């Protein structure tokens, strides 16, 4: 059904709003300045299944970085928005293998565990807290 949500004006070309709950599908997205007259541009918004990270191979990386990590999970999309986040460091995906498997190169880090999360749009990340443990090489 039709649902109206409040948007925040960012610029003459950009608005921010939070999508209401929905199921996997494409829906119409139009805007209004007065809650009555809506645009009719045919804009679309796509609800996507939530992605998840379930397993990493290997689950350890050297502190100097450049360790390839195979990430297993669900609902990865082969797009320019697909990224991995090691702790707070975001890196591009090195290889999309399938919607269930990608490869990311671990960036340099400090010894200890960090959460590895994935995003299909560079903004909304998984929240599974699967960890990579950084270690100093012998």
Image (spheres, helix red, strand yellow):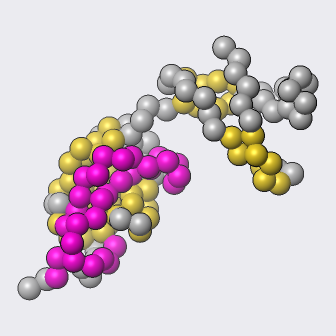
Q: Position of residue 93 (x, y in %)?
A: 39, 58
Q: Is residue 7 left or right of residue 110?
A: right
Which span of residues is magenta-colored?
107-136
At x 54%, y 24%, the residue is 22
At x 60%, y 29%, the residue is 20
Q: Nearer the viewer, residue 55 or 127?
A: 127
From the viewer's perspective, is residue 56 above or below residue 61?
A: above
Q: Is residue 22 left or right of residue 31?
A: left
Q: Position of residue 68 (x, y in %)?
A: 25, 65
Q: Nearer the viewer, residue 5 or 69?
A: 5
Q: Position of residue 59 (x, y in %)?
A: 17, 60
Q: How many marks?
A: 0
Asked if residue 48 can be seen in this view, the reply is yes
Q: Quadrant of residue 60?
A: bottom left
From the viewer's perspective, is residue 136 above or below residue 55?
A: below
State the quadrant of the C terminus: bottom left
Q: Position of residue 11 (x, y in %)?
A: 83, 54
State the quadrant of the N terminus: top right
At x 89%, y 22%, the residue is 36
Most extreme residue toward the left is 138
Q: Nearer the viewer, residue 8 or 44?
A: 8
At x 44%, y 31%, the residue is 49
Q: Is residue 70 left or right of residue 22?
A: left
Most extreme residue toward the bottom is 138
Q: Quadrant of residue 116?
A: bottom left
120 is within the stretch colored magenta:
yes
Most extreme residue toward the front is 6
Asked if residue 93 can be seen in this view, the reply is no
54 is within the stretch colored magenta:
no
Q: Nearer the viewer, residue 52 or 44?
A: 52
């Amino acid at each position: 059904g039709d649902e109206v949500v409040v948007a925040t004006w960012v610029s003459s070309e950009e608005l921010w709003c939070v999508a209401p709950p929905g199921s996997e599908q494409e829906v119409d997205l139009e805007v209004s300045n007065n809650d009555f007259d809506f645009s009719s541009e045919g804009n679309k918004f796509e609800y996507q299944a939530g992605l998840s990270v379930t397993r990493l191979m290997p689950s350890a990386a050297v502190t100097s970085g450049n360790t390839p990590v195979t990430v297993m999970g669900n609902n990865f999309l082969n797009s320019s928005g697909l990224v991995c986040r090691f702790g707070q460091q975001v890196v591009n995906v090195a290889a999309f293998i399938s919607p269930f498997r990608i490869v990311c190169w671990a960036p340099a880090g400090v010894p200890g565990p960090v959460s590895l999360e994935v995003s299909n749009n560079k903004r909304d990340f998984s929240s599974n807290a699967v960890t990579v443990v950084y270690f100093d090489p012998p």
